[in-house]
């Protein structure tokens, strides 16, 4: 994951083998707390949606986002990627303790799709479309009948 300052990104990942990653309402709240602790200090969180087996976060990269740091094994990586790794690792550890399980909770690669690209050569805003997609995800998945029913 390599981000560019002042660009917006759609960050997403899902459960390993499409498994559930949020088992109860406290899990959702804990993940939001982790987003605030890990990602908010280094990127502007524009919106998010947590689904039973995946999540979406739209962020705007800033100077802190792209700052290089030494990570595990001495390799340089950007602050955002480092903190996203901590978020997913600490959440996974908490869920494994809660469920008395072991192993990976998330798929290996968290995706970061830049949102400034044009769609099929048009000037249409991928950012605007992505906001709509993220916010409508629970409805489109059939989890609610009305968007305001999804917490």
Image (tube, rainbow, N blue to C red):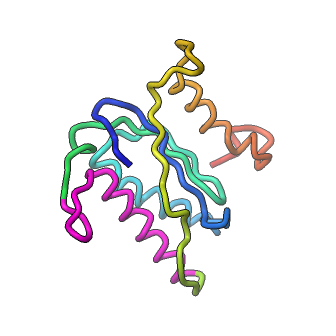
State which quadrant residue 17 falls in: bottom right
Direction from residue 45 to residue 49 in the image, left or right: right
In percent of width and height, residue 72 lies at 26, 69
47 to 40, vertically: above or below = above
**Residue depicted at 41% across the width and 54% down the height:** 35
Q: Residue furthest top?
A: 123
**Residue depicted at 47% across the width and 25% down the height:** 117
In percent of width and height, residue 71 lies at 24, 64
86 to 12, vertically: above or below = below
9 to 151, vertically: above or below = above
Residue 124 is inside the magenta segment = no
State which quadrant residue 90 falls in: bottom left
Q: Report the number of numbered marks.
A: 0
Given residues 70 and 54, the one toward you in this image is 70
**Residue depicted at 44% across the width and 34% down the height:** 114
Given residues 52 and 84, the one toward you in this image is 84
Direction from residue 147 to residue 11 in the image, left or right: left
- Magenta: main secondary structure: helix
28 to 57, vertically: above or below = below
Residue 92 is inside the magenta segment = yes
In percent of width and height, residue 143 lies at 76, 49
Given residues 49 and 102, the one toward you in this image is 102
In percent of width and height, residue 9 lies at 43, 37
Give the extent of the magenta segment: 70-98
């Amino acid at each position: 994951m390599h981000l560019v300052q002042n660009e917006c990104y759609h960050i997403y990942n899902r459960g390993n083998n499409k498994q559930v990653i949020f088992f109860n309402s406290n899990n959702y709240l804990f993940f939001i707390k982790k987003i605030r602790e890990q990602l908010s200090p280094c990127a502007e969180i524009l919106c998010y949606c947590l689904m039973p087996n995946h999540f979406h976060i739209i962020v705007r990269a800033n100077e802190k986002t792209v700052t290089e740091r030494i990570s595990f094994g001495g390799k340089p990586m950007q602050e955002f990627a480092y903190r996203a790794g901590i978020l997913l690792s600490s959440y996974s550890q908490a869920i494994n303790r809660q469920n008395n399980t072991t192993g990976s909770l998330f798929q290996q690669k968290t995706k970061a799709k830049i949102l400034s690209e044009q769609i099929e050569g048009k000037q249409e805003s991928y950012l605007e479309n992505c906001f709509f997609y993220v916010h409508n995800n629970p409805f489109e998945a059939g989890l609610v009948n009305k968007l305001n029913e999804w917490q």
